[in-house]
Amino acid sequence: MKIGIIKKWDQLKGWGFIEDLNEDEDYFFNIANVRKGIVIKEGLKVKFDVTVGQRGDEAENIGLV
């Protein structure tokens, strides 16, 4: 699993980007890929897996560190 910070979050659209803390990489994510019960906000530290989506690498299985 990777560790990152929620860099951008659009609550109305239900998507955002996670900045990987170990690599210079940002990953797109959708609210559907966040574990239940977690309230997403910018600056939140999270752990996540990476999968290949329709437009490239995406974060999934997003949970709290």
Image: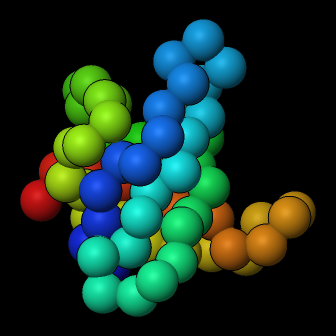
Q: Residue furthest right?
A: 54
Q: Residue at x 46, y 83 (%)?
A: 24
From the viewer's perspective, is 50 left or right of 1?
A: right
Vertical position of residue 30 compared to residue 64: above or below: above
Q: Is residue 32 among what the camera can see?
A: no
Q: Residue at x 41, y 49 (%)?
A: 7
Residue 20: name its quadrant. Answer: bottom left
Q: Residue furthest left?
A: 65
From the viewer's perspective, is 40 left or right of 16?
A: left
Residue 41: name its quadrant. Answer: top left
Name the quarter where the N terminus is drawn.
bottom left
Name the quarter where the C terminus is drawn.
bottom left
Q: Residue at x 68, y 74 (%)?
A: 57
Towards the viewer: 35 or 5: 5
From the viewer's perspective, is 59 left or right of 1?
A: right
Residue 55: name its quadrant. Answer: bottom right
Q: Is residue 20 among what the camera can see?
A: yes
From the viewer's perspective, is 8 left or right of 30?
A: left
Q: In the rendering, at what x and y percent does residue 10 appear?
A: 55, 24
Q: Residue furthest top?
A: 12
Vertical position of residue 55 compared to residue 45: above or below: below
Vertical position of residue 19 compared to residue 44: above or below: below
Towards the viewer: 27 or 35: 27
Q: In the rendering, at what x and y percent does residue 23 appear?
A: 40, 88
Q: Residue at x 36, y 48 (%)?
A: 6
Q: In the rendering, at what x and y percent does residue 16 appear?
A: 55, 41
Q: In the rendering, at what x and y percent does residue 35 appear?
A: 34, 42
